[in-house]
Image: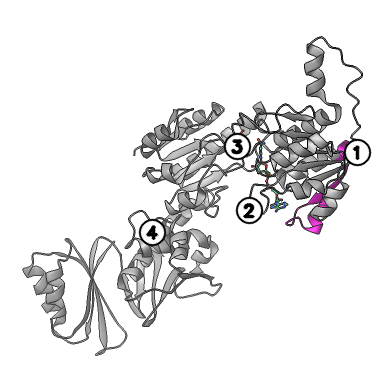
Amino acid sequence: MTRPKVLISDKMDPNAARIFEERGCEVDVITGETPEQLKARIADYDGLAIRSSTKVTADILAGADNLKVIGRAGIGVDNVDIPAASSKGVVVMNTPFGNSITTAEHAIAMIFALARQIPQANERTQKGEWPKNDFMGIEVTGKTLGLIGAGNIGSIVAARAQGLRMKVIAYDPFLTPERAIEIGVEKVDLDTLLARADFITLHTPLTEETRNILSAENIAKTKKGVRIVNCARGGLIDEAALAEALDSGHVAGAALDVFQTEPAKESPLFGKPNFICTPHLGASTTEAQVNVALQVAEQMADYLVSGGVSNALNMPSLSAEEAPKLRPYMKLAENLGSLVGQLAHGNLTRISVEREGAAAELSGKPITGAVLAGLMRQYSDTVNMVNAPYLAKERGLDVREIRHDREGAYNTLLRVTVGTESGERSVAGTLFGTDAPRLVEIFGVRIEAELEGHMLYIVNEDAPGFIGRIGSLLGEAGINIGTFHLGRRQAGGEATLLLSVDAPIPPELVRQACALQGVKTVMPLEF
Ligand SMILES: NC(=O)c1ccc[n+]([C@@H]2O[C@H](COP(=O)([O-])OP(=O)(O)OC[C@H]3O[C@@H](n4cnc5c(N)ncnc54)[C@H](O)[C@@H]3O)[C@@H](O)[C@H]2O)c1
Ligand SMILES: O=C(O)[C@H](O)COP(=O)(O)O
């Protein structure tokens, strides 16, 4: 078996490369390349491990023909074009907790640095000035800290600030009242936070809602003498407006770890006496870097080697224990999707995937993803279970997942039903033993077959002599029949025939089969 190849394209703790190798991956560490160099190289790799420096754009992904997973050793994935990765079928995963404590500590360090002007005092002291009378600080005890965003990092900042005897208030529309009580913060609206906070610290991702959340207008609503910290994302603060507010003295101090444009080589904030900054160092501690490197390598290797999915942003999680149980179902699901896609005439408007028996105990999303991948493989060579749900959505397909508790005739069953212009059509399949996928029903007719290779589906009038005629036709064309499956609803009605054959059926032979007496449908199938 060829070993999956992984590229580490940002500076990362060496534990990442070690774990990849131990888990059976080949690994190259090539950092500091231009986008053009990465684009030229990326086609060779199954996995790409990054931090925030590598920008994974749609242009780079266009050439990433073997790429299966992008792993972010850290939290923010705004440097990855996730929609482009999804439509390419690439899983994007991050390590959502590995650097949270470290980043929260950086925010607290910034609060103290602002309160006591440590960087400025340090610089002038080392110049030999001994400026003892120029740096009157403030205590943080008893001050109000306003958190904008009270997720993982925000809540750790809250806990540390409470230890410093600060009063913590939080604006976060997704913070439940119960969680606010649990982390000991007062949930407030944004205007209240702006009006009351002595220190404001930002801990949200950059989204359309949070971009410029500290705009000129909102900065004007803050308490005079407020101090502002941003260790989350550049773009949350209007930097020009902040510079003006620092000049006017409305904002007493600001500390930024992140900038609208990074690397920040120039900024309206640079050089202001009440402004301090660090070059995106929030996650830069030995501990955090070991954590995220180990975690990203474990997660990516899990996916590449055993199909386990954790912390993915564009597909549901799947444990490494569940992945082997799901594998035979994925094959069955993909085959059923492919069968129904090949057989259904007209535009599909909806599809449902039902799970019954043992299948009902498994995660539905990967199974549905595999059905959709099988269904859409006719339209796209690059479709897989990751991008299939996105492609289905783009096509306006209504997708439903149904889980039945009932006991059926089979220990385990998947049923796929599509809605077409001519009504609903359904196919079903099971597993023989624990891992052999079998079709058991096709459009209401019971028929047992393995879906594999070249096949021929025929519906004909159930009358004597037909099997001989189709056998002769294939024999005369030199096409050997592998397996032969028959089903019917009732004697003398319609019969369904499913043959596996050793060679593709040419269009001419399909025409000849259609012309045979009693034939209603002939469809060559490929699996
Ligand atoms: N400086 C660094 O090196 C560094 C390191 C780690 C993380 N980060 C960044 O810190 C940020 C926070 O990380 P996290 O792990 O706490 O994320 P998280 O997802 O756990 O928390 C984000 C919080 O923001 C809240 N939120 C979302 N939209 C909001 C809005 N419009 N207004 C107010 N709150 C809103 C969410 O409800 C959530 O509680 C991320 O952007 C991450 O990339 C930076
Ligand atoms: O989102 C994150 O995890 C931080 O921004 C850390 O980024 P870095 O890995 O480039 O230090």
Residue receiving disc 2? 208
The secondary element bearing badge 3 is classed as loop
Whether residues under marks 2 and 4 lie with C-beta atoms below 8 angstroms apart, the answer is no
Work out whether mark 1 precedes mark 2 in sequence or the reverse, and give the earlier one: 1
Amino acid, disc 3: Thr
The quarter of the image that holds ligand 2 is: top right
Which residues, given as a range, are shown in magenta?
A: 162-183
Relative vertical location of residue 419 with respect to residue 507 in this rendering, above or below = below
Residue receiving disc 4? 331
The secondary element bearing badge 4 is classed as helix
Residue 275: x %, y % from top left: 76, 30
Q: Residue at x 12, y 65 (%)?
A: 479
Work out whether mark 3 precedes mark 2 in sequence or the reverse, and give the earlier one: 2
In this view, the residue in front, 85 or 499, is 85
Residue receiving disc 3? 261
Write down the quadrant of residue 524 in the picture.
bottom left
Relative vertical location of residue 217 with respect to residue 233 in this rendering, above or below = below
The dot on residue 165 is: 1
Is 302 displayed left or right of 75 in the figure? left
Q: Residues within 10 Å of mark 1 (few under 14, many from 20)?
A: some
Amino acid, disc 4: Lys
